[in-house]
Image (tube, helix red, strand yellow):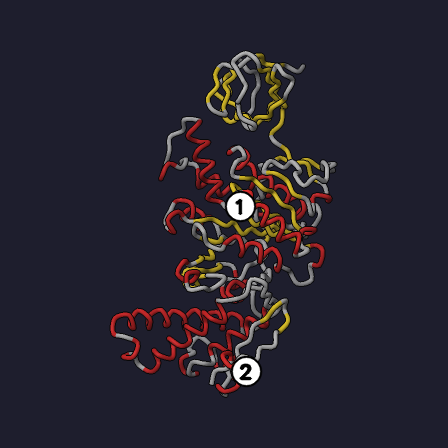
Amino acid sequence: MILDYVGVKEINGSLIVLDDVENASYEEMVDIRLDDGSIRHGRIVQTQGKRCVVQVFEGTKGMSLDNARTRLKGHPMELALSPEIMGRVFNGSGTPIDGLGDIYPTHKANINGTPINPVSRIYPQNYINTGISTIDTLMTLIRGQKLPIFSGSGMKHNELAVQIVRQAQIAGAGNKFGIVFAAMGVKNDVAEYFRKSFDESGVLERVVMFLNLANDPIIERTLTPRCALTAAEYLAFELDMHILVIMTDMTSYAEALREFSSSKGEIPGRKGYPGYLYSDLASLYERAGMIKGKNGSVTQIPILTMPNDDITHPIPDLTGYITEGQIVLDRSLEGAGLYPPVSVLPSLSRLMKDGIGEGFTRADHSALSNQLFAAYAKVMDARSLASVIGEEELSPIDKKYIEFGKLFEAYFVNQGYNENRTIEQSLDLGWKLLSTLPREELDRVDDAILDKYYIEDKDSIVFETFASSEKKDDDSDDNDIA
């Protein structure tokens, strides 16, 4: 028997309260029909006995206490899924907005997902090549990992996200590799930038986009990452694809969650965010991984902007506890004109040790990465000392580290927006840079590897740029160091 509940007890912003409701379930979907025949959709966000609170997706404008008839749907929010979602663009709640018509589903799934049994998880291995030297060499993205990007407001994280979407690939995956891209709280021009960039670069056919605009309802913003991850799980675990999920900006999501929590009258925690922010973020991030018996995988790159560039803010702080490393963007590097402005020393990938080396990237990868980190740390020490006593008073070896730091930032960190480097090109470039230092300074690498890769003839070291995985001819004398 289907029951319609006539009228509402209370209206508070986008929330309505119903009394005497039988068998209502948390997160159950409802349809609300107004007197003019229009239908609005909502979700039960709180239950207390026979009283329930419903969040109305389209808002409560035009609703009164007696002009609404509410019908419970008997199931949580579900996303319509089929193989044809590849190349499509949806709004934050999974409705197509690209003008290509509705999805004819072969499957529907609860957007909250199904928890992965820890026993059935496979340890992440093998890497995803992004074509970006700093990421591929020093903080390698491993298939099945969750590796966030910590950025600042106004920095070039959107450009970096687009570049990763364009260039990311898994060796041997072919058309079994796809990307789910979710944007939350973005302005119209940013959303158009994403769509145009993917379309013009020809990668849109392997991308599923979920776009939640800044003027869309906040409840939709809290649904967007769940819809995106549900699509990713379907593609990975039903169609055996390797899916990279990029979600930007998780700060917009967390702020929507804070506003939503406040409207329900919940007790706030740190900086006004709800006390369950940690578990809520974990419910999203932990949907990455690989499962025994399934050939696909879900890898996540959540992007978040740190308010006031504060890495101890609750959002990056809690994200760091849940995820397996981070990529930190630095405002001073961006101010110096470097792209991408990846701050090497605070960035890391905790799973890279098991996805690089012989059989994955190259046998020297781990040693090279350790030595580059160590050398750049000495660069920072030398610069700190130079700021006190002056660069001309530094020792000869400190001056060499200062010079190494300039070259490292100019040629390794700095990379063109359309520059796609193979892992071999990035590793070779790293050895060229290390070869500008005296061999005895490279104490993180054993002699056998040094014999193979260290360049004794300094006059032969030429730094080059790469584009589309092909070397560009560069006749500039500035690229030749003697």
Residue 6 visible (yes or no): yes
Q: Quadrant of residue 344?
A: bottom left
Q: Amino acid at mark 2?
A: Lys
> In the image, 366: left or right of 1?
left
Residue 113 visible (yes or no): no
Check disc 2 and report the residue beneath it.
452
Instruction: Indicate the position of residue 231 as horizontal and vertical percent values.
Output: 64, 43
Placement of 138 over or under 472, stated as above or below: above
> CA separation, marks 2 and 1?
41 Å
For mark 1, give the secondary structure.
loop
Check disc 1 and report the residue beneath it.
286
* Residue, far left: 389
Residue drawn at 69 percent across, 62 percent down: 172
Instruction: Indicate the position of residue 7 as horizontal and vertical percent values.
Output: 55, 13
Q: Amino acid at mark 1?
A: Glu
User: Could you tell me which quadrant the N terminus lies in?
Assistant: top right
Q: Earlier in the sequence, mark 2 or mark 1?
A: 1
Which of the two residues, 401 or 324, is positioned nearer the viewer here?
A: 401
For mark 2, give the secondary structure.
helix
Residue drawn at 41 percent across, 58 percent down: 331
Q: Quadrant of residue 267?
A: top left
Residue drawn at 48 percent across, 19 percent down: 11
Placement of 35 over or under 356, stated as above or below: above
